[in-house]
């Protein structure tokens, strides 16, 4: 992950891509070289955040949902973030299981630790918030881990949708529960089977 630079705010760009769960607003950073160069470098802008549709009422699988309003300091640039747009399209088509992108999620040290661990959850696997807390060595911080999970600025790419509650509920998701269900279904996650595995882990 790239370290933030003071000039980043001047180089923020965004683009909107369509997806089966509604429009996604991708926000990224161009470094100085990419800002002044051709499309190939601009396509590799550092991805900073992904936003779902603009209101919870729109967060269904309807195609007419409105995009999330872009940050006021970001410029629309449809030639940027092409790698991110392409890899997301491949993911939704079922031909990609892992993302290979430069990322810069901004958060506290604890949040970034949680997000790093989220990135290690394999495609098609669901774990519990308790298990996530155990994985970072903080078994008593389940609530804090859940909060950090909910503040993940790069959903899908950093797969916070692969975390579910131990009691079987899908819990919260920035894109809405229908979107979370869709993503887990796309990956072939068998939620009852995952819950059985979680139950066995919790009994240890």
Image (spheres, helix red, strand yellow):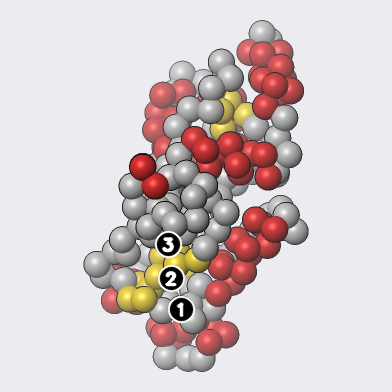
Whether the residues at callouts 2 and 1 have beta carbons within 8 Å, the answer is yes
| Label 3: how many Cα within 10 Å (few below 14, some 14–19, many 20+) | many
Q: Is residue 69 left or right of residue 156?
A: left
Task: From the viewer's perspective, tell me whether residue 135 is left or right of residue 200.
Answer: left
Q: In what element is the residue under mark 2?
A: strand
Of the two numbered discs 2 and 1 on the same chain, state the one appearing first in sequence: 2
Q: Residue under label 1, please give it.
A: 78
Residue at 75% x, 59% y: name it.
95
Q: Earlier in the sequence, mark 2 or mark 3?
A: 2
Residue 186 in sight here: yes
Residue located 34% across and 52% down the image: 54
Task: Say what secondary structure mark 1 lies in.
Answer: loop
Q: Position of residue 146 (x, y in %)?
A: 44, 30
Check whether the beta carbons of the residues at disc 3 and disc 1 lie within 8 A of each other: no
Mark-to-mark CA distance, 2 and 3: 6 Å
Q: Position of residue 185 (x, y in %)?
A: 67, 39
Looking at marks 3 and 1 on the same chain, the residue that comes earlier in the sequence is marked by 3
Q: Residue at x 51, y 91 (%)?
A: 38
Callout 3: helix, strand or loop?
strand
For label 3, the residue is 25
Quarter of the rendering containing residue 85: bottom right
Reply above or below: 30 against 124. below
Residue 170 position within the rendered picture, expressed as x and y whole percent measured from the top left: 53, 28
- Cα separation, mark 2 vs mark 1, equals 5 Å
Q: Are marks 2 and 3 in contact (CB under 8 Å)?
A: yes
């Amino acid at each position: 992950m790239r370290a933030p630079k003071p000039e980043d705010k001047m180089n923020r760009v965004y683009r909107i891509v369509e997806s089966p769960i509604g429009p996604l607003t991708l926000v990224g950073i161009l470094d100085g070289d990419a800002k002044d160069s051709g499309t190939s470098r601009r396509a590799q802008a550092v991805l900073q955040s992904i936003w779902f549709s603009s209101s919870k009422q729109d967060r269904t699988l309807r195609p007419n949902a409105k995009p999330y309003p872009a940050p006021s300091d970001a410029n629309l640039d449809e030639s940027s973030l092409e790698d991110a747009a392409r890899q997301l399209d491949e993911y939704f088509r079922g031909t990609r299981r892992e993302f290979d992108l430069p990322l810069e999620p901004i958060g506290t040290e604890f949040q970034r630790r949680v997000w790093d661990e989220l990135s290690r959850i394999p495609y098609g696997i669901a774990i519990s918030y308790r298990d996530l807390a155990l994985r970072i060595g903080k078994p008593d911080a389940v609530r804090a881990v859940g909060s950090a999970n909910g503040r993940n600025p790069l959903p899908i790419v950093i797969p916070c949708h692969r975390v579910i509650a131990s009691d079987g509920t899908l819990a919260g998701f920035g894109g809405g529960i229908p979107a979370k269900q869709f993503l887990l279904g796309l990956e072939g996650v068998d939620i009852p089977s995952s819950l059985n595995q979680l139950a066995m882990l919790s009994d240890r």
